[in-house]
Every structure is written in C-alpha cells, then in structure tokens.
Image: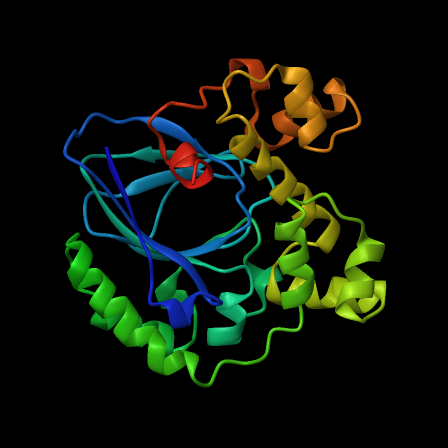
Amino acid sequence: MSFTRIQPHPDLAQLIDCYWIVTGDDAETRVEKIIPDGFTELIFHYGDAYRTDISGSWQIQPPHLLAGQISSFFSLENTGQSIIVAIKMQPAGLTQLFGLQMSDYTNQIFGLDAIPNHNIARLRQLLPPTADEQALKLVFDGFFLPLSKSVTANPVNTAVNHIFERNGMVTVKELTDIAGVGERQLERLFKRYVGLSPKFYARVIRFNYIFEIIKNKSLPWADVVYQAGYYDQSHFIRNFKAFTGEDPSAYYFDEDNMANFFLNK
C-alpha cells in the first residue's frame, strides 16, 4: 500500500487537516483496524469496494462517503485493488462548511448521496477519478477556498485548540472557562460541531498522543504512561484497549497500515 498526505492551501488550515491518498495494486484481501483519531473525513473510492464492520456485521462501503467521529475501533477490508482519495476535516469543519449536525454521524458511515447538501453534491461531481497529487490538490483547494469565505463561526474553536495544545490532558472545567460557556452549553456545542462530548474528545486526543510519545523507542512503558497523563499503567492499558482492542505491548506501532498512517503523523 502507498500512503500520501497532501497539505491544503494555508487559508484552509482551520477547516481541513489534510488531503490523503491510499493506493494498492495487490488484490489480496486484508482486514485492518480503523482507530479513533479525532477527525472526520470525506472519502472517495475509485478502486474496488471496501467493506466495514462497525456494529457486528460486514457492509459494503458506498463509493463516496462521510465518515463521522468514532468512539472505538472498527474493521475495514478491501475486496480488491485500492484507489482512495479523501479529505480529513478539522473537528468542526463539516459543520462550518456544510451546516451538518455531527452527532448524527457519530460511529456512522454515510453515502454522500444520502446527505441533502448541494455543495457536497457539487464536490462529488467535480472530483476526477485520479490519484494524481497535484490534480487532486487543485480540485480540492479550488472547491474549498471560495466556500471558506462564507463559513459559519466556530464556537468550539478555543476549546478544541486547548485540547490539542494540552494533548488531551484537560478538564471540562478548563474548557468551559476557556470557551466562556457553561458545561451544558459546551456539551451541546460539541455535539453539534464535533460529534463527541468534550470529555470524550479529550480522551481521544490524549490516546493519539501515545503515538507521538512512542516514536522515542527508548522510553519504557512507565514513562509513556506518565507522559500521556494516565493515573497508572492499568488505567493506560484499559484506555488503549478501549480504542484499539489490543494491549499496547502487543500493538504493532510500525506496521504499514491505515491506522498508523493517520496516527503516526
């Protein structure tokens, strides 16, 4: 498999994390896990279909889809050759650009043709079936830059930025103080703009930070646990298993797969 990350135009940084491409000529099927990383995506398949198992049964993915926030891992399997291009959105980007209620898409994969939004429909028509990096960047930037001029405000921006700055090691009280709203209002805003509660979203980002720490391969597990802000090793292991289904000592952090492509930035 080949994994490519493409930076969007700098003016889109508050809305879009990156564009990405995954290609693979090997038609042999392979099951892998997708792990929460705190971002939502618009995904376009131009190779053979993929199947997903989110709730205990395998389903064929739509060719063009929206992947919402996920609270735990799920399984993904190719059915042949892969040509995937996608847009990894900032946490509130889909609401700002398209007015979506993100809690409606949590732990869900929706075909884009099932989402009644004319700009999403227009994007599907514009996108060329190619994995050429420059062509995709031109199409995506050209589509999103004019749209970004009239995006809605992001009332959770300061809270989300603080979660990232602190690698998820924050309290809800800190977030309400920074955002200048009460806890119930913050919950409602996160439900609309992010799709997860502020407390759970901070857990996801703290879990992601493990992958940054682990790049220093000389660190013992005790130091990883401490740097990631967990109370003790058992708490760390429970949290890791909740998001991956695996013990951290058994997880292949260097394996060439989609989960590590997204988490090992």
Above or below for 28 versus 6: above
Q: Quadrant of residue 27?
A: top left
Residue at the location (33% across, 67% down)?
A: 9
Along the horizontal axis of the image, is 96 left or right of 178? left
Q: Give the residue at x 54% y 38%.
A: 55
Residue toward you, 84 or 53: 84
Give the percent coordinates (x, y) of residue 223.
67, 21
Q: Position of residue 220 (x, y in %)?
A: 61, 14
Please say if 55 is above or below 42.
Answer: above
- Residue at position x 36%, y 27% from top? 31
- In this view, the residue farthest toward the bottom is 150
Give the position of the C terminus as an image quadrant. top left
Q: Nearer the viewer, residue 11 or 59?
A: 11
- Locate residue 221: give its quadrant: top right
Residue 141 higher or lower than 27, as above or below: below
Q: Nearer the viewer, residue 170 or 32?
A: 170
Q: Where residue 86 sits: x, y (%)?
A: 32, 54
Left/right placement of residue 244 relative to residue 13 reads: right
Q: Residue at x 47, y 75 (%)?
A: 97
265 or 151: which is nearer to us? 265
